[in-house]
Amino acid sequence: GQLFYDDDHQTPDTQVATFEYDDCLLMYEMRLWADYPLEGFHNGAVFYGDEGTLGIDPRRVVVHKKGEEPKQIADGDSFADHPRNFLDAVKANDPSKLTAPIETAFETVTLVHMGNIATRVGDKLHFDSVSCRFTNNEEANKLVSRHYREGYELPEV
């Protein structure tokens, strides 16, 4: 919901979304403007697993296995190259130059969009990842993509 600012933004500033898979459950919590940090991270993400946690923010990546001390495995400098790599690959029109597959970004962003769409329509949604459509809510499907102005359409791939 919109808990911190009463304005006209359309995406929530506080949100919990649950994604159910056959073999696991993924819970996403987002809270902008919170007065408390997330597990010692000012801004970023913490992934909780059966064997520990993985914390990521713009300054570091920390692995904390159960029963062990947290271990920093990367620093903020490792993040600076990611946007530059993406832009270089776009300029060269060469996906092989990417350090991470674009499909991984697509799958990640799809989860974010699904959570926002579910919040907007106020319903539990079932998603077909092959067709990229919701199987139980046509109102949600209308939010999957948009109509673009002439000359700015996305190319067919």
Image (cartoon, rainbow, N blue to C red):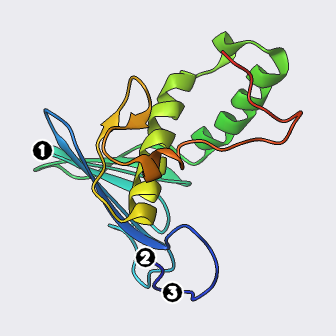
Report whether residue 112 is seen. Answer: no
User: To which quarter of the image does residue 84 belong?
Assistant: top right
Which amino acid lies under the numbered mark 3 shown in the image of this protein?
Phe
Q: Nearer the viewer, residue 71 or 120?
A: 120
Specify the label residue 4 is tagged with: 3
Residue 102 visible in the picture: yes
In the displayed structure, would residue 98 be above or below residue 143?
above
Residue 52, placed above or below residue 91: below
Which residue corresponds to mark 2?
1
Q: CA distance from mark 3 to mark 2?
A: 9 Å
* The furthest residue to the right: 151
In the image, 94 versus 114, the foreground residue is: 114
Residue in the picture at 42% in, 44% down: 111
Q: Measuring from the top left, give residue 128's x and y in whole percent.
A: 34, 31
Callout 1 crowding tier (Cα within 10 Å): few <14, some 14–19, many ≥20: few
Residue, disc 1: 50
